[in-house]
């Protein structure tokens, strides 16, 4: 029997290739202590390569920024809630409230990551600080490690800390993003001996230079 490719098959292949783009790879990777840190820059799309054996490191945990009520109500926390089909949110509400700096470990997203860590970076007035982010990330890493996780996905928290950046002038929004990146990287540096692989998901391309700068700083300080 003769094998042949029809015009329809070619059209379908082209369509599939288009849907698969862009093909995201880490923008930067750094070895720090016992950890490898990958910076991914992907606009509102979790890069699929994170879940491959080449990058994942093993069982994964996704981190979501929340307040003591553990509600994943908006921005990146809402995106992560949707990944689990709301299951992690229902699970978390039974454990609320938690103090600022603590974390809750719940269900993950099927075929993506095993667990979701709700990191309580805010107080009840939605205020946060570098020390709160450090504590919440540290506790998230501890809980994930106890469940056998070898990797964590930590998205940029800027959109939750500044829920409506469009209300700010561009320069003001960028300043907030720069401050958030510095605080988050401080927290990530503190868990480098707990989690073998750390994935930073910068889902707003404008903020990527802040993370690359912080990673370069950490490289020089190691």
Image (cartoon, rainbow, N blue to C red):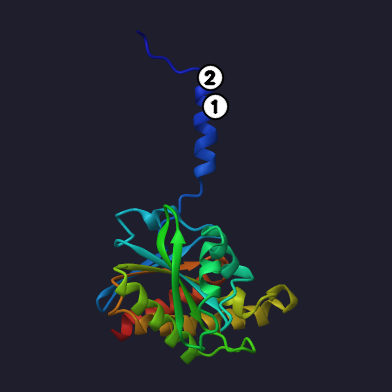
- In the rendered image, the vertical position of residue 125 relative to residue 50, given as above or below: below
Res 175 label: none
The image shows residue 113 at horizontal and vertical percentages of 41, 60
* Mark 1 secondary-structure assignment: helix
Q: Residue at x 42, y 63 (%)?
A: 27
Q: Nearer the viewer, residue 23 or 81?
A: 81
Label for residue 7? 2
Does residue 145 appear left or right of residue 182 in this picture? Answer: left
Question: Residue drawn at (52%, 84%), measured in percent from left and top?
Answer: 121
Q: Is residue 125 left or right of residue 101?
A: right
Q: Is residue 156 visible?
A: no
Distance from the alpha carbon under mark 2 to that under mark 1? 6 Å
Residue at 51% of width from left, 36% of height from top? 16
- Place residue 165 in its image quadrant: bottom right
Q: Quadrant where the N terminus lies? A: top left
Local crowd at mark 2 within 10 Å, few (<14), some, or many (≥20)? few
Q: Secondary structure at mark 2?
A: helix
Name the mark on residue 11. Answer: 1
User: Where 126 falls versus 52 (above or below)?
Assistant: below
């Amino acid at each position: 029997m003769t094998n042949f490719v029809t015009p329809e098959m070619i059209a379908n292949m082209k369509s599939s290739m288009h849907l698969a783009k862009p093909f995201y790879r880490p923008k930067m990777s750094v070895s720090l202590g016992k950890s490898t840190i990958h910076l991914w820059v992907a606009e509102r799309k979790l890069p699929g390569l994170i879940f491959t054996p080449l990058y994942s490191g093993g069982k994964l945990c996704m981190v979501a920024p929340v307040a003591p009520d553990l509600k994943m109500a908006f921005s990146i926390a809402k995106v992560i809630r949707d990944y689990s089909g709301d299951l992690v949110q229902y699970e978390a509400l039974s454990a609320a409230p938690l103090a600022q700096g603590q974390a809750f470990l719940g269900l993950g997203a099927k075929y993506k990551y095993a667990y979701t860590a709700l990191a309580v970076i805010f107080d009840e007035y939605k205020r946060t600080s570098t020390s709160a982010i450090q504590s919440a990330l540290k506790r998230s890493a501890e809980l994930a490690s106890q469940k056998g996780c070898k990797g964590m996905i930590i998205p940029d928290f800027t959109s939750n800390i500044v829920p409506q950046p469009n209300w700010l002038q561009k320069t003001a929004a960028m300043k907030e993003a720069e401050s958030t990146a510095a605080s988050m990287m401080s927290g990530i540096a503190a868990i480098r001996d707990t989690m073998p692989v750390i994935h930073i998901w910068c889902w707003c391309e404008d903020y990527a230079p802040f993370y690359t700068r912080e990673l370069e700083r950490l490289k020089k300080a190691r």
